[in-house]
Amino acid sequence: MTMTLDGLVAGPHGEMDWVFSSSDKTTQDYAHDLLDGSDQILLGRGMAKEFLDYWPTHELTNEIDKKSDIKTFAGKINILPKVIFSKTLDKAEWPKVTIAKDIASEISRLKSQPGKNLILYGGAGLVHSFIDLNMIDEYHLMVAPIILGKGLSLFANLKSSRKLYLIKTTNSKTGVVILHYEPAKE
């Protein structure tokens, strides 16, 4: 997840324009590598609409996109199967999408199958649920050099604290620091 220095994933009105302005080859290569190591995308209902409507129609928009081969990234996103977690959706309007109601049972089912990693793109509410259920094996946080002051917090209102162990840091030329954590062993 990309977040601000003050732990926000969106501004007070859902603004996320700062995400792409802090992107560079380092952050994009990291995102490509994470996606390459995954064979299933996990999304919440709210995030799914924006996410699944954006990627099939994405066009190259700037020099960073052209240099990082974002079309390949979009192609990977479009080809991978997805699970949307929702208590209100009954069917998907997109191809290669499954709807799941119960996080714990669906993740248990998916983890019992052979394959690569599962990648959770969000939204924040779904991430909160995964954290509260101890369902996150690794955290990859791209911390952008911006402070919003107000907005949607990635970690607000968790049921309990989580201790993490730092695995690796990666710095980008735009000032983004990528933090790779695993939950500490209890």
Image (tube, rainbow, N blue to C red):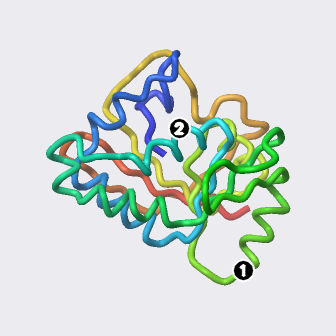
Residue 27 position, x and y percent, is 30, 52
Report the side of 56 relative to 64 (left or right). right
- Where is 35 relative to 90, above or below? below
Q: Amino acid at mark 1?
A: Gln
Q: Quadrant of residue 157?
A: top right
Which percent across, then down, holds residue 180? 46, 57
Name the residue that disc number 1 marks: 113
Task: Decide if residue 65 is on the left or right side of residue 100.
Answer: left
Q: Tag 1, which secondary structure?
A: loop
**Which sits in the foreground, 98 or 3?**
98
- Residue assigned mark 2: 50
Amino acid at pointer 2: Glu
For image coordinates 55% across by 71% down, the residue present is: 39
Marks 2/1: CA–CA distance: 28 Å
In the rendered image of this protein, does residue 14 appear above or below residue 26?
Answer: above
Q: Would residue 108 be found to the left or right of residue 15 on screen?
A: right
Label 2 SS: helix
Residue 151, given in percent of the width and then of the height, sits at 53, 20
Report whether 44 appears left or right of 52: right
Which residue appears at 79% of the width and 68% of the height?
108
- On residue 162, the disc is none
| Residue at the far bottom in the pictured view | 114
State yes or no: discs 2 and 1 in contact (Cβ < 8 Å). no
**Number of marks present in the image shown:** 2
Residue plotted at (45% across, 42% down): 54
Marked residue nearer the N-terminal end (2 or 1): 2
